[in-house]
């Protein structure tokens, strides 16, 4: 082994040793420490306008953020697949970012592929300051190792200041044990700002994040699964969120739904589970034309219907979901009830279908169980 490779191995070991600790700080206070105190870090402020393409990029003053994409896909026979691509950034300490290996930022990547019979996933870590992972805005590019989510080109005639113009065409790629994929993405509608123009409340005592999505991606490309190449196409949803303490200390996790209705509308709802008081619900109704409406918390009802046992936990994988103002009364079912992400901070994430007053497909994420 050359001296260069020895150095790389040692540096990688140091990064991996530090990464889980950075993410786990305060892990007993909300899912993965998101309810822990965040002294010295920036806080979301109501009325702060989001600016693009700047806010596609990282926010070093905040402790935690992520770039998150999930996709509902089908092959030529109509069989359902799910794909996930996620990059997380976590700051271990507040203050200006330090250079090189003194940098206090840790990056974590998750990738997954789900079928009716399998759920495959991979996890990777990187230290900040050395180029192994990061995000740039002009052009947009998010990466960790050789996993990439990047803009392909600007939308014809759209300026960089148009929300979503810098990400109207993109590509993603990732790989893990038993899988690799590469997909192209295209959206013809602008980004959607959740909550109050992107200020997304998470609790009654003022916890919040900045949160926006691109729920109108169409996606197609190739998945290689155990050496077998499969051409897939479908719909994808990108979430972008950042904060420093988005959860209250008593909130241990969430149940989050992103739904593509067959009639073209989109729906995002979530419930933050609180061990001492009323659960906090929020959501956004998105018209087929891209117009968004913030939902009142009392307009949303989420009821578990059936449970499964995974990794020593009991998880509600089927749900009844109601949004009274839009006549939504549906029941969801997982493509694969065993879509467990056995990562450093384990959670359930997988594609779902739904039927009832409306039909369609989407994704469900459940954390903190």
Image (cartoon, rainbow, N blue to C red):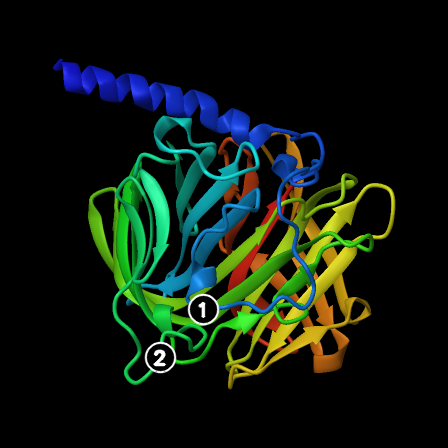
Graded by Cα atoms within 10 Å as few (under 14), some (14 to 19) or many (20 or more), the crowding at tag 1 reads some
Q: Earlier in the sequence, mark 2 or mark 1?
A: 1
- Relative to residue 223, is residue 24 depicted above or below? above
Q: Position of residue 83 (x, y in %)?
A: 39, 54
- Relative to residue 139, is residue 197 depicted above or below? below
Q: Nearer the viewer, residue 231 or 248?
A: 248
Mark 2 to mark 1 CA distance (whole Å) = 10 Å
- Relative to residue 121, is residue 10 depicted above or below? above
Residue, x 65% and y 34% (percent of image)?
A: 313
Q: Is residue 337 left or right of residue 108?
A: right
**Residue 66 shows in the view:** yes
Q: Secondary structure at mark 1?
A: loop
Q: Position of residue 170 (x, y in %)?
A: 31, 65
Residue, x 64% and y 35% (percent of image)?
A: 33
Task: Name the mark on residue 159.
Answer: 2
Quadrant for the N terminus, please.
top left
Q: Secondary structure at mark 2?
A: loop
Residue, x 63% and y 71% (percent of image)?
A: 197
Q: Is residue 191 left or right of residue 278?
A: left
Quadrant for the C terminus, please.
top right
Residue, x 36% and y 64% (percent of image)?
A: 74
- Relative to residue 308, is residue 183 depicted above or below? below
Q: Which residue is mark 1?
A: 52
Q: Nearer the viewer, residue 29 or 363?
A: 29
């Amino acid at each position: 082994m050359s001296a260069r490779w020895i150095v790389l191995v040692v540096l990688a070991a140091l990064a991996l040793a530090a990464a889980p600790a950075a993410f786990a700080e305060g892990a007993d206070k909300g899912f993965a420490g998101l309810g822990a105190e965040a002294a010295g870090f920036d806080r979301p402020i109501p009325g702060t306008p989001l600016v693009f393409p700047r806010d596609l990029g990282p926010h070093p003053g905040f402790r935690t953020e992520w770039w998150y994409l999930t996709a509902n896909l089908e092959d030529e026979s109509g069989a359902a697949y799910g794909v996930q691509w996620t990059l997380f950034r976590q700051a271990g300490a507040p203050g200006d970012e330090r250079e090189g290996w003194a940098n206090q930022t840790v990056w974590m990547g998750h990738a997954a592929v789900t079928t009716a019979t399998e759920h495959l996933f991979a996890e990777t870590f990187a230290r900040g300051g050395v180029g192994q992972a990061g995000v740039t805005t002009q052009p947009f590019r998010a990466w960790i190792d050789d996993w990439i989510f990047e803009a392909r080109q600007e939308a014809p005639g759209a300026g960089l200041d148009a929300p979503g113009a810098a990400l109207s065409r993109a590509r993603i790629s990732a790989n893990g044990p038993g899988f690799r994929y590469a997909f192209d993405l295209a959206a013809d509608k602008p980004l959607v700002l959740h909550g109050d123009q992107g200020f997304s409340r998470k609790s009654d005592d003022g916890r919040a994040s900045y949160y926006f999505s691109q729920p109108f991606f169409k996606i197609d490309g190739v998945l290689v699964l155990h050496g077998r190449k499969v051409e897939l196409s479908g719909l994808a949803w990108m979430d972008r969120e950042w904060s420093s303490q988005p959860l209250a200390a008593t909130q241990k996790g969430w149940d989050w739904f992103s739904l593509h209705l067959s009639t073209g509308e989109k729906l995002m709802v979530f419930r933050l589970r609180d061990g001492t008081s009323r659960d906090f619900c929020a959501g956004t109704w998105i018209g087929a034309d891209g117009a968004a409406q913030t939902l009142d918390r009392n307009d949303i009802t989420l009821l578990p219907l059936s449970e499964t046992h995974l990794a020593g936990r009991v998880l509600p994988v089927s749900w009844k979901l109601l949004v009274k103002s839009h006549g939504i009364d549906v029941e969801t079912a997982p493509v694969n009830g065993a879509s467990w992400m056995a990562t450093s901070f384990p959670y359930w994430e997988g594609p779902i279908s739904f039927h009832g007053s409306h039909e369609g497909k989407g994704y469900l994420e459940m954390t903190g169980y």
